[in-house]
Amino acid sequence: MRLIQLTGASEYDVIVVGGGNAGLCAALTAVENVERVLLLEKAPFEFRGGNSKYTRDIRYAHEKDTFTTGPYSEEEFLNDILKVTHQETNIELARLVVRESRNVPEWMSGNGIRWQRPLSGTLHLGRTNLFFLGGGKALVNVYYETARKRGLQVAYNAMVEDLIVEDGQCVGVIANIEGRRLELRSRSVILTAGGFESNLSWLKEYWGDAVDQFVIRGTKFNDGRLLRCALEKGAASIGAPKGAHMIAVDARSPKYDGGIVTRVDSIPLGIVVNGSGKRFYDEGEDEWSKRYAIWGRLIAEQPNQIAYSIFDSKARGKFIPAMYEPYSANSIEQLADILKLNPSTLAATVKEFNNAISGRGKFDLASLDDCSTNGLTPPKSHWALPIDTSPFFSYVLRPGVTFTYMGLSSDQRARVIRRDGTPLKNLYAAGEIMSGNILSRGYLGGFGLTIGTVFGRIAGEEATR
């Protein structure tokens, strides 16, 4: 990998904009077919990799193998997508991702990735997902090293200001690299620059002042500039403007770049209340890997965009802890004082929950058990254990945005589609910038990386034809 010094106009076979997983998969595929491939990464070297450096696993269809606990068929995978999106998905693109996901582990291994057994405390992912050794940072570093050996050119601190479109065809980009504004010509351009989640003013167009309480758990460099630019050039948009991968994070998290350690996984093992000390949603609705990404939006819709995960000593140790220690107390009333909640209200909520637990069946965190509530609104459908064992614990929760779903309309060849339904020639997209074609709502753990890997490879192949 050459850290290039660009001066004046330059010409390439393929320019990839964005240096995360999707961009690296596109670039690694492209360099197999052509020589002059340039990757433009907006971040400096030490922050390269976008949101991908905060990942740890990838979802894929498979029979049982060494690193998973059971089979995961294409049919089940597709049904999971349809379930979490409420069937609001491009079914052909969803089928394509599921089908191609079977080949992903072998391709990743061929590009240097190594695997490990599922992490202890990771809820409901051991059968469906592969965990890569070293997590997302290792993934990114390995791909960059593999790309270096294959001659990929990379420029850091490279902000693409505009796309060069002539006669309905993308022929290059205008980039500011280390303070120099350059015109870079290319036979094809692949956009993998993520969503617009770090652009707070853009988020406020849809969420209003609630955004002030949001945590942007991923990179601060995903400002949506290239997305907006492509839309201005005539590309069609896809996905709801408010759609996002938005989870519950520890309220003490940094505003940007907190990553995966800010995530709070205690929710299915207790209850969640708002600032009034009242529950507002079923904490055990489905497997956590299919529901964790709805909780950010649920919290965003609560007063002051804040909520509280309440659990007891029986639950502690059954999930991967967040970055900070939870608040603790010897009674629910004392815990309420620490959280600045009304003690009698929180105690009444916990008592009502405990009294509503049906007591049927056996608690089983690994499956959709029949430990549920009876006559409680909202119900808790699974993993309903009484909160009765001191000490008691709580995480204070805020909405944590990972990436936005509104993006570029694209087809099975990863081509960007214009508003008139025709392809914008020689312009391709992969990763978060086009994930709204498949993820209109909801999420499956590890699925974003699957979309980026599959469409990154397709874009890299198509761009070199």
Image (cartoon, rainbow, N blue to C red):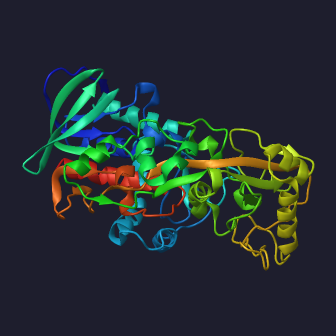
Indicate the position of residue 308 as horizontal and vertical percent values.
73, 52
Vertical placement of residue 207 versus 99, above or below: above
Vertical placement of residue 32 versus 423, above or below: above
At 84% from the left and 60% from the top, the residue drawn is 345
At 42% from the left and 60% from the top, the residue drawn is 101
In this orientation, does residue 66 appear?
Answer: no
- Left or right, 190 with reference to 133: left
Indicate the position of residue 397 as horizontal and vertical percent values.
67, 49
Indicate the position of residue 356 as horizontal and vertical percent values.
84, 74
In this orientation, does residue 146 appear?
Answer: yes
At 38% from the left and 45% from the top, the residue drawn is 194
Q: How many marks?
A: 0
At 21% from the left and 43% from the top, the residue drawn is 189
Indicate the position of residue 437 as horizontal and vertical percent values.
35, 62
- Left or right, 180 with reference to 100: left
The front one of 280 and 439 is 280
- Left or right, 162 with reference to 248: left
The front one of 44 and 336 is 336
Quarter of the picture containing the N terminus is top left
Residue 197 placement: quadrant: top left
Vertical placement of residue 4 versus 371, above or below: above
